[in-house]
Amino acid sequence: MSLLFLCPTKDPAPWLAGIKAVDPDIDVQVWPDISHPDDVSFALLWQHPHDVFTRFKNLKAIASLGAGIDHILQDPTIPRHLPVARIVDPNLVASMTQYVVTAVLHSFRDFDLYKQQQTTQTWRPAAPRNIADFPVGIMGMGMLGSDAAQALAALGFTVYGWRRSGPAHPALEASFAGEAMLPAFLEKTRILVCLLPLTTATRGILNTDVFSRLQPNAYLINVARGAHVVDSDLLEALGNGSLQGACLDVFNEEPLPADHPFWRHPQITVTPHVASITNPQTAAVQVVENYHRANAGQPLLHAVDLGREY
Ligand code: GLV
């Protein structure tokens, strides 16, 4: 039995240390140095090269190295009969909430304006703002969205939630579900936070139609996936005033190409996909547990349904 670390864009060292700290006896093979492919029974994936699974005839299960599984689904050669798990870690939830709260406060407290004024040594305090004028709308009310909603409500924000289906979270002022209720949700929202999984239905959802329905001087925070955004629609919305600004952590192409207009846009804050990164130290425990479960033919922790796409 062997665990395959198939994450070419990640440094394997902290993962190897984390996995070995939990179980020193696990045999780990790090892509592309595979010396005994037939022993591979469990693969940990992040932005893996496609078309490699024919090499691993005895693979029993797959795990995403993050919370999302969209990177796995993008590979048409993935062995779809195998169980797939994702990472569920309280640290991921906490760091996402920290990021979302920071970005919401950045917009509400007008940091873009003061940063701009600083470039010309301008001392011009703006009129105090009323938190009631900055309702936040969260798209995607899973574990991450619910935690962010709770933290923002505790700070005094009015928070609305939109999800595909499911019950309302108690921190929400109101909850909206399904495509039919999306316009009503957007009309209530000034600061829009995207925490949706990337699926066939949500790809390109942050587009002109959505931006134009938001309250005036709206602000976008995207911490989900770059492919939720239609980049040209976002630039247009910033240009025509439907959006006042945006804070983006994820991009259609990562790393964001040097010549991409988002880099230099005065109304856009760019961060390099850091909102919530899996911590190898804490996440290794569930990876090791799932490795043993897969080898024993037991159901995985945090298993996902590939058909549902998240
Ligand atoms: C990060 O983007 C993740 O999916 O964990």
Image: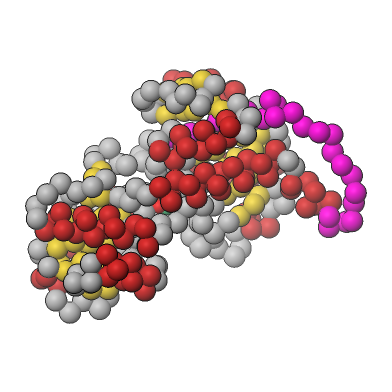
Q: In the figure, 179 relative to 255: above or below?
A: above
Q: Nearer the viewer, residue 133 or 169?
A: 169
Quarter of the image with the C terminus in it: top left
Q: In the figure, 122 relative to 259: above or below?
A: above
User: In this rendering, does residue 90 appear at all?
Assistant: yes
- Name the spot of residue 158 as percent of width and height, x first: 60, 26
- Name the spot of residue 122 as percent of width and height, x first: 90, 51
**For residue 7, what is the image quadrant?**
bottom left
- Residue shown at 37%/58% (left/top)? 282
104 in the magenta segment: no
Which stretch is magenta?
118-140
The reply, left or right, for residue 310 in relation to residue 274 is: left
Quarter of the image with the N terminus in it: bottom left
The reply, left or right, for residue 57 in relation to residue 22 is: left
- Residue shown at 44%/40% (left/top)? 144
Magenta: main secondary structure: loop
Q: How many marks?
A: 0
**For residue 32, what is the image quadrant?**
bottom left
- Residue shown at 57%/30% (left/top)? 153
The reply, left or right, for residue 289 in relation to residue 231 is: left
Q: Nearer the viewer, residue 86 or 205?
A: 86
121 in the magenta segment: yes
- Name the spot of residue 308 as percent of width and height, x first: 27, 37
Q: Nearer the viewer, residue 74 or 67?
A: 67
- Name the spot of residue 51 as percent of width and height, x first: 23, 63
User: In this rendering, does residue 245 appear at all?
Assistant: no
- Residue shown at 31%/60% (left/top)? 284
